[in-house]
Amino acid sequence: MATITVPENYGAVIAVALGAIPVLGFVHGSITTGLRKEAKVPYPHSYATIEQCKSNPKAEQFNCAQRAHSNFLENAPQTMLFTLVAGLKYPTAATAVGAAWLISRVLFLYGYVYSGKPQGKGRMLGATFWLCQGALWGMSVFGVGRDLISSATLGF
């Protein structure tokens, strides 16, 4: 039977991965829902039409919020997993990089929704989240994954 020993300071890893990241998802959803009402985009429509955006600036802002939220949902699950796995070997680094990912995602959200730059180009303010996500992936695969492979025994 395999056992996994978690480091003493693994609680901080859990706080980032299973605490703060889901809270940011809730913030994304709240902002998007609030802007949906102002944009007058009825359910079940995901985005405002081009015509709605031309006549109502809040519709364009809603689209930016909706896309920022979708992008968050596309990236959060693997980031949570990478943070939890990387934290098994590198708890302090995983916590710090996970927190940096969160800060980058907040800047991404702010820039996309509130910067006023056309076509949501303000999102580039937080584009560094990709670097953080890549670092967490690397720590997971080349740190923890390599250790698991090297310690595995094959019994035939």
Image (cartoon, rainbow, N blue to C red):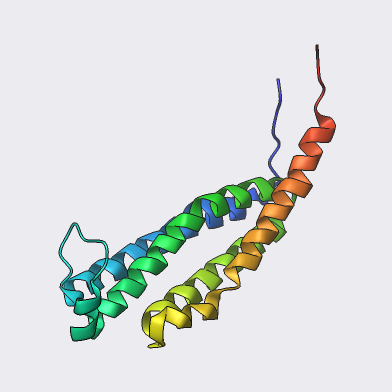
Task: Report if residue 109 is visible in the image.
Answer: yes
Q: Nearer the viewer, residue 18 or 51?
A: 51
Residue 7, compared with residue 44, is above or below; it is: above
Of all residues shown, which one is farthest toward the front?
Answer: 51
- Residue 15: which quarter of the image? bottom right
For the point 48% across and 74% down, which residue is it?
Answer: 108
**Left or right: residue 49 compared with residue 71:** left
Quadrant position of residue 113? bottom left
Residue depicted at 66% across the width and 60% down the height: 134
Please name whichever residue, 55 or 133, is drawn nearer the observer in this view of the structure.
55
Residue 101: percent from left, percent from top: 58, 66
Outermost residue to the top: 156
Position in image of residue 92 (x %, y %) = 70, 58
Q: Measuring 75% from the left and 44% from the top, which residue is drawn there?
A: 144
Q: Name the residue nearer the viewer: 138 or 95.
A: 138
Give me the residue at 45% from left, 62% from top: 71
